[in-house]
Amino acid sequence: MIYAAIDIGSNAIRLLIANITNNNGVISFKKNSLIRVPVRLGDDAFLNHSISDKKADDVIKTMVAFRNLMDVYKVKDYMACATSALRESKNGDELVKRIFEASNINLEIIGGQKEAHIIYSSHVDQTLDRKKNYLYIDVGGGSTELSIFSNGKIQASKSFNLGTIRILDNQDKPETWDEMKLWLRKETTNYKVLIGIGTGGNINKIFRLSEEKENKALSFLKLKAQYEYLNSFSLKDRINILGLNQDRADVIIPASELFLTVMRWGGIKQIFVPKVGLVDGIIQVLIDTNFPVK
């Protein structure tokens, strides 16, 4: 059985094709194919609050291609979600209709809290030591989702309109930074030690560049050193010398700054980087829906 997950984000559009297995009643999935298309809707959404005709056409072409791939793979079930870029676009609902007409894909524009809930569905919490406390940090192009885990459960969660594309476009607001700082100071005060959990394409790339061992935490100091190393190169050199993709080479700097800021305000000295994201959570939501626990 094969499921598919689509994530229309502020920086890129992703399609995950996953094989679903049933091992004596234990349902799990294995990634088959992951396709990423760097459309970068956030530039339109955060500057003009509307998706341009050109980018709308690019999205529709991408979704038609995804539909064809899903048909070839004989996908049994799928779920398609759009996050902050379409949330903030005046013509977001109109684009959703055009996508359905062109590709027969039902797309849902989801709020920040639902986005966070879906990512949690990837069962990040099952990898946690329930005796420890964690601050979950997901940095995207348009928003950052923060959640505190204690005793294996979410104790507090909030979405902030601070993301890599938004920062690059100078659309981040000082009051939003202040709001995040106050939230962190308030919600983390009762925890003596908090460990970070970071998700998103940028922190995954930073972790790989750090050459830290798999399943090991990245220290604040090592993350800071990695940021300073990356920032010592020009955008052109991050592409040509470090080999970063063009749509990763610019956003990785504000992403690093976001993670470092959150860790500093939350008093976090180390961060784990599991390889999960929204598309992984979507697949798990489909599994939970189609195979409910009896």
Image: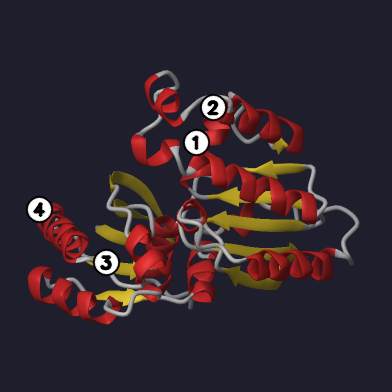
Is residue 247 among the parts visible in the rendering? yes
The three-letter amino acid code for the residue at tag 1 is: Lys
Could you tell me if the residues under marks 4 and 2 are in contact, i.e. CB atoms within 8 Å? Answer: no
**Measuring 50% from the left and 59% from the top, which residue is drawn there?**
122
Above-or-below relation of 225 to 85: above
The three-letter amino acid code for the residue at tag 4 is: Val
**Measuring 46% from the left and 76% from the top, which residue is drawn there?**
111
Label 4, on which residue?
72
Could you tell me if the residues under marks 2 and 1 are in contact, i.e. CB atoms within 8 Å? Answer: yes
Could you tell me if the residues under marks 2 and 3 are in contact, i.e. CB atoms within 8 Å? Answer: no
Could you tell me if the residues under marks 4 and 3 are in contact, i.e. CB atoms within 8 Å? Answer: no
Label 1, on which residue?
205
**Residue 128: x and y, percent?**
69, 53
How far apart, in angstroms, are the residues tagged by discs 3 and 1?
Answer: 27 Å
How many other residues sit within 10 Å of disc 1, few (<14), some (14-19) or many (≥20)? some
> Which quarter of the picture shows residue 223?
top right
Label 3, on which residue?
78
The three-letter amino acid code for the residue at tag 3 is: Tyr
Q: Considering only order in the chain, which callout, 3 or 4, is on the residue closer to the N terminus?
A: 4
How far apart, in angstroms, are the residues tagged by discs 4 and 3?
Answer: 14 Å
Which of label 1 and label 4 is nearer to you?
A: 1
Label 2, on which residue?
209
**Residue 13: x and y, percent?**
30, 55
Above-or-below relation of 28 to 120: above
Looking at the image, residue 152 sits to the left or right of residue 160; the answer is right
Q: Considering only order in the chain, which callout, 1 or 3, is on the residue closer to the N terminus?
A: 3
Q: Considering only order in the chain, which callout, 2 or 4, is on the residue closer to the N terminus?
A: 4
